[in-house]
Image (cartoon, rainbow, N blue to C red):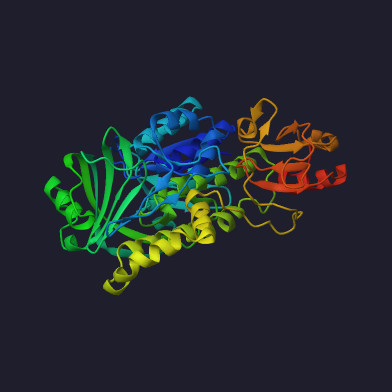
Amino acid sequence: MSVIVVGAGPTGLALAGDLAGAGVPVKILERRAEESNLTRAFAIHARTLELLDMRGLADGLVAQGIQVPEVRPHIKGAELVFNMRHPDSRFPYVLILRQARTEAALEARARDLGVEIVRGAEVTGLTQDADGVTLTLGTGDSERADYVAGCDGAHSAVRRLLGVGFSGKSYDTRILLADVLLKRQLPLAVNPFIGDDGAALLPPYGDGWFRATIWDRTGQNVPIDEPVTIEEVRDSLRRIAGDDLGLAEMSWSTRFLSERRQARAYRVGRVFLAGDAAHVHSPLGAMGMSTGIQDAANLSWKLAAAHQGWAPSWLLDTYQSERHPVGRTVLRLTDLLRRLADAPAPVRLLRPYIAPAIINHPKVSEKARLTLSGLGIHYPVPDGTLTSPLAGHRMPDLQLGTGRLYERMRGRFLLLDATTAHQAATPWHDRVDVLRTDDPILYGTATTMLIRPDGYLAWTATRPDPQHIRQALRQWCGAAR
């Protein structure tokens, strides 16, 4: 079995690296002849860092970035604090890091694992049958594989060739992106400034540099291809933030229209959509790249199971049932944030009162924190599988003896057991790692846990008999060999 990944952005690189690590023959086709210098994404949230930690990448990325523990909205001179110090994660912050550096780490991993990346390969045709998928390229050549993953961005050729609807809308307000040097010292936080004329989001890169993401309603009629000037950015900051924050230099800038859209289907036969090809949304919340990497982590082990011949018949369908609702939640949250930032006049009058009420409400702020970070994601229990406490929930990174659980998560199922029942898993040794621990209780009341390769719980039990373990393994990992 082989897989072609279309698109060499963060989602495609993460997916291809996972597949290659599991022994799946994989190739990336990238339309661009050269690597892009466009770096819209700037943040990695906690759950995505945990997934990267399972792949041995997180610590290297954290060393390059800025750890930001708070969001500090500034509204009409008032400064609020939204806490992102996650007590339930090894990464109690948002990591601010240029997308190019994240891509470089993912690409280096993919290449080290043997992934071939073909640049200048534009997909112009797609057909599939019961045995595989054929892609036609702009050169007239063709490529064939058992499965294809479209990770080729918001204007995805794969999605268009599949005929999958991309429902939603474009926002009217043009967005300015710029990397700026500010002389005014701002808090170590993501700093949104919200004013009557729009909003400016300013996360720090370090050494006084910030990524400015600006919604300015006075600039709606500026052509999308007109270059952004430092004077335009300075004028927007003055009107939105109250002053120009000591803007001294601008190194990079662009202008674009933001959209709120989601693919109606993430799977059509042997073809899957992930990342921006499956969902695009407002950059408020900085959730795009993190959500795409999470898509890849969800899909990769399921395709690997199909390659290895033990995937249950329902497994590939769970990519749609698990990730489509997550994408919908991200769209709703980022749309709400965008509406609050770019609100009509009556709402703007109430914003200084509404925002503190929301941020200071414990249940609301906790729900927002878990949604933004991805730590609150949980998946439905598939029909026909054993139900159990916490099934489908994220498995925390437990300290086990002298090491951490995530250090043992390397793309395979893991049976974590505090009893002697783990011996029942021996016939599945080719796809399930077993970790015995002396801790009497592992998590909640569970003494035995079957953990999926993406770090979510498939099944848990308290002192189960071997028969139940074998039943759970058969359901999730196929027949024993």
* Relative side of 393 to 8, left or right: right
Q: Nearer the viewer, residue 30 or 474?
A: 474
Q: How many marks?
A: 0
* Relative side of 321 to 349, left or right: right
Q: Nearer the viewer, residue 211 or 143?
A: 211
Q: Is residue 364 above or below residue 297?
A: below
Q: Is residue 368 above or below residue 245?
A: below
List x then y, in percent, for residue 356.
40, 61
Q: Nearer the viewer, residue 376 or 24?
A: 376
Q: Is residue 401 above or below residue 297?
A: above
Snapshot quadrant of residue 73: bottom left
The C terminus is located in which quarter?
Answer: top right
Q: Residue furthest left?
A: 231
Q: Residue furthest front?
A: 78
Asked if residue 393 shows in the view, the reply is yes
| Residue sitting at x 77%, y 40% | 441
List x then y, in percent, for residue 88.
58, 44
List x then y, in percent, for residue 314.
67, 54
List x then y, in percent, for residue 196.
24, 64
| Residue sitting at x 54%, y 51% | 270
* Relative side of 449 to 154, left or right: right
| Residue sitting at x 50%, y 43% | 46
The N terminus is located in which quarter?
Answer: top right
Asked if residue 25 shows in the view, the reply is no
